[in-house]
């Protein structure tokens, strides 16, 4: 490219923590959206467990986030199997219909 960097420096605010990162320009929106989502979950746990330390609250947020990512990955891995099962069920139904027509 003509001397223009594909990266940019952004500053994110995660509760009381200020985070400065250098990210791909096209990814900035994802970082900001993720920051907003993490802050929302942090506030959720802060309301539910007001006496918890900030560290404990972030552990809850991290755990919840990772469980969500694992569920998404698992469901994505199942998609080809679900399609294959649908195809097999259709073949079975067609075969059964053919058998019933022969009778």
Image (cartoon, rainbow, N blue to C red):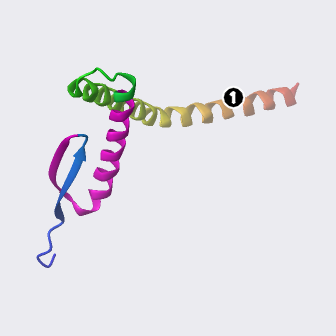
Percent position of residue 101, x then y: 86, 31
State whether residue 35 appears in this view.
Answer: yes
Give the residue at x 28% y 62%. Answer: 26
Where does the C terminus fall, quadrant-wise? top right
User: Eyeballing the image, is 76 above or below 4?
Assistant: above
Chief secondary structure of the magenta span?
Answer: helix
Q: Residue furthest front?
A: 51
Q: Is residue 67 visible?
A: no
- Quadrant where the N terminus is found in the figure: bottom left
Instruction: Classify 10 Å Cα crowding around label 1: few (below 14), some (14-19), many (20 and above).
Output: few
Q: Is residue 3 magenta?
A: no
Q: Residue 22: where, in percent of width, then height?
A: 15, 56
Q: Quadrant of residue 43?
A: top left
Residue 31 part of the magenta-drawn span:
yes
The magenta stretch is 16-45
Q: Residue at x 32, y 57 (%)?
A: 29
Q: How many labels, in total?
A: 1
Q: Position of residue 64 (x, y in %)?
A: 35, 28
Q: Nearer the viewer, residue 59 or 98?
A: 59
Q: Could you tell me which residue is drawn at 80 percent across and 31 percent down? A: 97
Q: Is residue 16 left or right of residue 79?
A: left
- Residue 11 lies in quadrant: bottom left
Percent of width and height locating residue 31 = 28, 51
Q: Which residue is mark 1?
A: 92
Residue in the foreground of this view, choosing between 27 and 42: 42
Q: Is residue 58 above or below residue 2?
A: above
> Hey, which residue is sitting farthest bottom in the picture?
2
Q: For mark 1, give the secondary structure.
A: helix
State the residue in front, 96 or 6.
6
């Amino acid at each position: 490219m003509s001397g223009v960097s594909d990266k940019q420096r952004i500053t994110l605010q995660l509760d009381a923590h200020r985070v400065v990162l250098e990210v791909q320009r096209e990814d900035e929106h994802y970082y900001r959206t993720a920051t907003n989502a993490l802050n929302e979950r942090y506030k959720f746990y802060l309301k539910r467990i007001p006496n918890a330390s900030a560290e404990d609250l972030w552990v809850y947020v991290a755990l919840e986030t990772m469980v969500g990512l694992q569920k998404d990955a698992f469901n994505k891995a199942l998609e080809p199997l679900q399609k294959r099962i649908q195809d097999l069920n259709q073949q079975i139904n067609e075969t059964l219909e053919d058998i019933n027509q022969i009778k």
